[in-house]
Amino acid sequence: MSAPMNLEKVFVREVQRNDSEILQINQCEVGDVGCVVWDAAIVLAKYLESHDFHRGNDLVDKAVVEIGAGTGVVGLMAASYGAMVTITDLEEFVPLMQLNIDTNKHLCRHPVQAKELKWGSELKREFSHVDIVLVADCIYYEESLEPLLKTLDDLCGNDTCIYCCYEERTTDNKPELQRKFLHMVEKIFSVEKIPLHRQDEQFCSEDIHILKMTRLRLS
Ligand SMILES: C[S@@+](CC[C@H](N)C(=O)[O-])C[C@H]1O[C@@H](n2cnc3c(N)ncnc32)[C@H](O)[C@@H]1O
């Protein structure tokens, strides 16, 4: 068991947008893995600003859900570009997500929601139409793979697009886990890997991958 999160002991990570606006993301000194910003979240957040992303997507007024959001930085970046965003995680993260929403609300066109969404659980009606699902650094333990896939499947209609960013790790069973997850995903979704040259020039890395996934169409 990890120690409970303490919102009195936070430290801020600033994430600068390309237009120099700054997202202030509170992270906790003590707590479970989601209480800090992971590199995959920065890579995905900055990709949302890229020319490549904007060629195919306009975030304004789009319904966006971030799952396993932790601090919520990726969803907040989307909200700062005009999306209607719900950031979700386990219940214990709702206060941290809410703190980050409150800290950054002046940058957001629509009020951002912080909600509990445990992977594999039945979805509430509020998630019935989603344009974009954001996922950063959520492929990391065996028991979560099936529930995570169920949640992605449940959130996605035919036109929903998932952006899933993960860091390739070489320790323990991580390579095997990631391979297994990709294998499972490819049965339901068509998967496109976004090459490095289409990502943010500075915030990208050989070992961090962004996958764009849409529901497979039956022909
Ligand atoms: C490595 S952290 C990544 C956090 C954030 N996306 C980032 O990249 O900075 C993984 C996140 O997944 C969440 N998570 C793990 N298992 C979960 C589950 N069963 N349902 C919902 N969220 C879960 C954790 O609470 C944590 O916030």
Image (cartoon, rainbow, N blue to C red):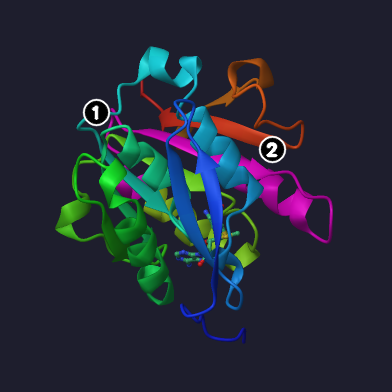
Callout 2: CB less than 8 Å from ligand 1: no
- Horizontal side of 197 relative to 171 (left or right) equals left
Q: Which of 17/121 is in front? A: 17
Q: Which mark is residue 208?
A: 2
Q: Residue at 42%, 35% (x, y): give it.
A: 21
Q: Residue at 58%, 67% (x, y): give it.
A: 143
Instruction: Say which label, 1 or 2, has the lower sequence index.
Output: 1
Q: Which segment did they paint magenta?
A: 153-182
Q: Label 1: few (<14), some or many (≥20) within 10 Å?
A: some
* Residue type pointed to by label 1: Val
* Residue type pointed to by label 2: Ile
Q: Secondary structure at mark 2?
A: strand
Q: Is residue 162 above or below residue 29?
A: above
Point out the image quarter for the N terminus: bottom right
Q: Secondary structure at mark 1?
A: loop
Q: Is residue 67 above or below residue 165?
A: below
Q: CA distance from mark 1 to mark 2?
A: 27 Å
Tell me whether the residue at label 1 lies in contact with that at label 2, contact meaning CB atoms closer than 8 angstroms: no
Q: Can the viewer see residue 17?
A: yes
Q: Which of 153/195 is in front? A: 195
Q: Which mark is residue 60?
A: 1
Q: Which of 127/82 is in front? A: 82
Q: Can the viewer see residue 187?
A: no
Q: Position of residue 49 (x, y in %)?
A: 46, 26
Q: Residue at 36%, 24% (x, y): give it.
A: 218
Residue 69 occupies quadrant = bottom left
Closer to us: mark 1 or mark 2? Answer: 1
Q: Which mark is residue 165?
A: none
Q: Is residue 154 above or below residue 147?
A: above
Q: Position of residue 39 (x, y in %)?
A: 65, 47
Q: Which of 169/74 is in front? A: 74
> Does the stretch in magenta take in 217?
no
